[in-house]
Amino acid sequence: MKWKELMLAQDSRVRKLLERYKWVLLVIAVGLLLLALPGGREKPLAKLEAQPASSQEFDLAEMETKFAKALSEIKGAGEVTVVLSVKTGTRQLLAEDSVSSEGKDGREEKTSTVVLSKGSGGEETVKLQEIYPQFQGALIISDGGDNPVVRLKLTEATSALTGLGADKISICNRGK
């Protein structure tokens, strides 16, 4: 008889505790469930697939040709030649791994570039970001370069495509 009474007393205490802390227990259960879900975890570096080189490799000559073709479509521009100058070439930011250790005379840090191993001994560096060059100036030579309206349209188009200000864009009339 005492055994049943003891079990009932414990059962009522457990119920009181559950009633009192039900929201805390619910939050903990939801947190554990979210931790158990497979999504949201980053891939380990070793499992990253090597991405192909950027499909838009920067080629200044090709860009000038495309740019000249587009500008020649402006009414009154006629035949257009474009010369662009850049401040720096294309740069790539590579993933780096650094290891810090304390030596006898202070702190020592070693940095190495992260490399992905490919099959048959090939390796490829991990690129974080590719930075295209900044334009420094533009020279536009146009058949309609002496017309102020055409000059304005060419300047606006060049500024929109290169990010250069009007003071960095020179438009000349083609001399034939």
Image: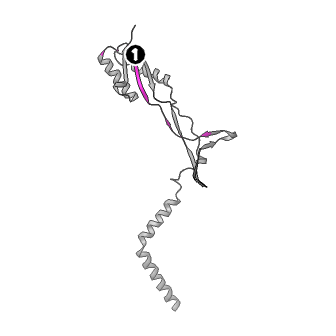
**What residue did someone put label 1 on?**
141
Dot 1 amino acid type = Ile
What's drawn in magenta, residue-wise?
124-147
Color scheme of the displayed model: one colour
Looking at the image, residue 4 lies above or below residue 48 = below
Q: In the image, what residue occupies the spot 47% across and 24% down?
A: 63
Q: Is residue 72 left or right of residue 34?
A: left
Q: In the image, what residue occupies the spot 46% across and 63% down?
A: 30
- Residue 44 showing in the rendered view: no
Rendered location of residue 19, percent (x, y): 41, 75
Which secondary structure, mark 1?
Answer: strand
Looking at the image, residue 126 lies above or below residue 74 = below
- Residue 68 showing in the rendered view: yes
Which one is nearer the viewer's eye here, 6 or 121? 121
Is 142 a magenta residue?
yes
Dominant secondary structure of the residues highlighted in magenta in the image: strand
Which one is nearer the viewer's eye here, 139 or 33? 139
Which one is nearer the viewer's eye here, 128 or 79? 128
Q: Residues within 10 Å of mark 1 (few under 14, many from 20)?
A: many
Looking at the image, residue 38 lies above or below residue 125 = below
Q: Which quarter of the figure is the C terminus placed in?
A: top left
Q: In the image, what residue occupies the spot 39% across and 28% down?
A: 161
Rendered location of residue 83, percent (x, y): 44, 20
